Image (cartoon, helix red, strand yellow):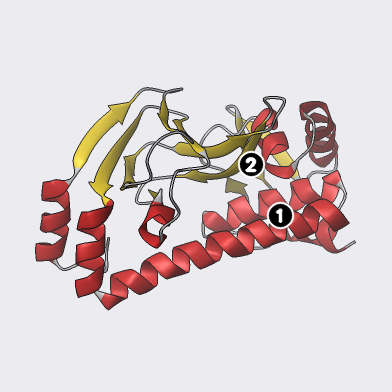
Amino acid sequence: MSALSPTQRASLEKDAVKRTHRKGTVISGPDDENDRVNLVVSGRVKIYSLSACGNEIIFRFCGPNSFFGIAGLFGAGQRNVFSEAVEDTEVMSISSASVERVVSENPALAMSLIRVLSSRIRQAHEAIREFVFCDARSRVAHLLVKLAEIEDDANPGVPVRLKGKMTHQDIADMIGATRQTVTEIINEFKRQGYVKSEARAIVILDCQRLRDLITD
C-alpha cells in the first residue's frame, strides 16, 4: 500500500469493506470465489490447507499490512486454501476489480504484488526441497531462522522474540512433522541454549547457532 498515492489509496479504501474477525474465525475457504483481495489491518491470519485425513498444512502467517488472496488477480479461479484469524483481527477486503484498476495506473504497485507472489513461490520451493532433503531438526531450525529474519533482527548473538503465539503444533504443521517430534527438538534446542520460552513465546538466543545446524 505504500506504493499508492493518497488519491489511489483513498479510492481503494472507499470500495473496501473492513471487518473484525474473532480469534478462530475462518475468513475464507476453498469453496469461496476468489474475487477479493484482503489486507490485514491488525492481528494475524493463518493461511493453510487440509490433507485428505484432516491434518492442517500451514503455509504462512500474515501480520499487519500483509496481503492475502492476491492470486485471484492472476486468474487463479476458486481459492484452494483457508484463511483463519489466529487472534482478534481486522481485515480490509477489496474487490479484485478495484485492485486491478489501481494496479493498471500504478506500475510500482504491480511490481510490489509480483514480488510478493515471487517470494511465496520461492518459499514453496524451499519447503519442498527441505522436506525431501532435510531432517526434522534442520527444518525446525530453518523455520525459526526465517521467522527471526521477518523480525529484521536476526543478528548473531542478539536474542529475537518471535511475535505471536507460535505453538509446537503450528511449527509441526508448517514443516510436515508431528507435534511430539517438534516438542522434542525444541526441548533439545533449549538444553543447548539455542532458544528459550518466555511468556508462551519463543525467544531465539542466537540465530547463527541455528543457521549452523541447517548446514551441518
- Judge by depth and name the residue closer to the eye, 147 or 61: 61
> Which residue is outermost to the bottom?
107
In this orientation, does residue 92 appear? yes
Task: Say which amino acid is labelled 1.
Answer: Ala
Q: Position of residue 164 (x, y in %)?
A: 51, 36
In this orientation, does residue 206 appear? no
- Please indicate whether residue 184 sits to the left or right of residue 127 in the image: right
Give the answer, above or below, for where 141 lies relative to 50: below
Which residue lies at the image location 17% right of the left edge and 54% below the top edge?
12
Task: Say which amino acid is labelled 2.
Answer: Val
Q: Which residue is mark 1?
A: 127
Which residue lies at the image location 23% right of the left edge and 56% below the top edge?
97
Residue 199: image tag: none
Indicate the quadrant where residue 162 lies: top right
Q: Position of residue 15 (x, y in %)?
A: 14, 47
Q: Quadrant of the N terminus?
A: bottom left
Q: Residues within 10 Å of mark 2 (few under 14, many from 20)?
A: many
